[in-house]
Image (spheres, rainbow, N blue to C red):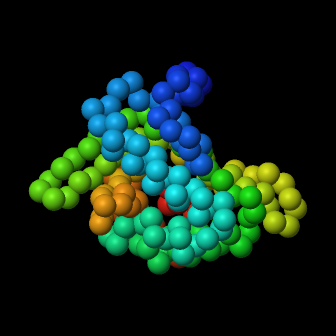
Amino acid sequence: MLVGMLLVSRCHHPTPSAAAVEIALRTTSDEKVLKELVAAFDQAEIAVQQANLEALMSFYGKDYNYHGLKRPDVRRVWAEVFSHYGHVRSRHVFSHLKIVQEGSRKQAFVTCTGGLYGTDKDSGAAITIDSWVGEVHSLVKENDRWKFQGNVRGTSPSVPPTSAPHHPLF
């Protein structure tokens, strides 16, 4: 199924993308929002490829929460990634998009399969830093920009921020 999604997605990509975002949606009622989301991922990807932590953190919402990890936690995780890995890049396949408007708040739920890749700075070996399948990214529009909010599955009190693996990155 994933191979099929990858093949179909090459035909439906709305714009060139730095993050190698592939669109495997059958249809979407809001192409404008989809393009904005791809642009947000592209901007984040440029920051990732440049190992620019400040620029990257601007794409995380003020209320970011991924299984109990907050913005300072994800900042620490990204800093660790950049200190251990070079040539970091990502890949995303969007398979479902849901937009929710509640008053003035607009939120997007993007089902995504993908990975984060780089090279080990010590050995030079290519490595998969993180991968995800069917992850539902939650994004919110703050000040006319889409910001990453976390994962719709909520928080888990059993995972302390100090033991976080390199997973809450996208």
Q: Is 92 on the left or on the right of 49, as rendered?
A: left
Residue 103 in view (yes/no):
yes
Q: Position of residue 22 (x, y in %)?
A: 53, 36
Task: Count how many numbered circles sit on residues in the image.
Answer: 0
In front here: 76 or 106? Answer: 106
Give me the residue at 45% from left, 70% from top: 58
Residue occupying the point 49% across, 71% down: 57
Q: Residue at x 18, y 50 (%)?
A: 101
Residue 77 visible in image: no
**Residue 166 percent location from the top left of the image:** 59, 62
Residue ranking furthest to the right = 123
Using the image, determine if residue 121 lies above or below residue 129. below
Percent x, y of residue 29 = 27, 32
Q: Is residue 111 left or right of residue 118?
A: left
Residue closer to the observer: 152 or 20: 20
Q: Position of residue 141 (x, y in %)?
A: 30, 59
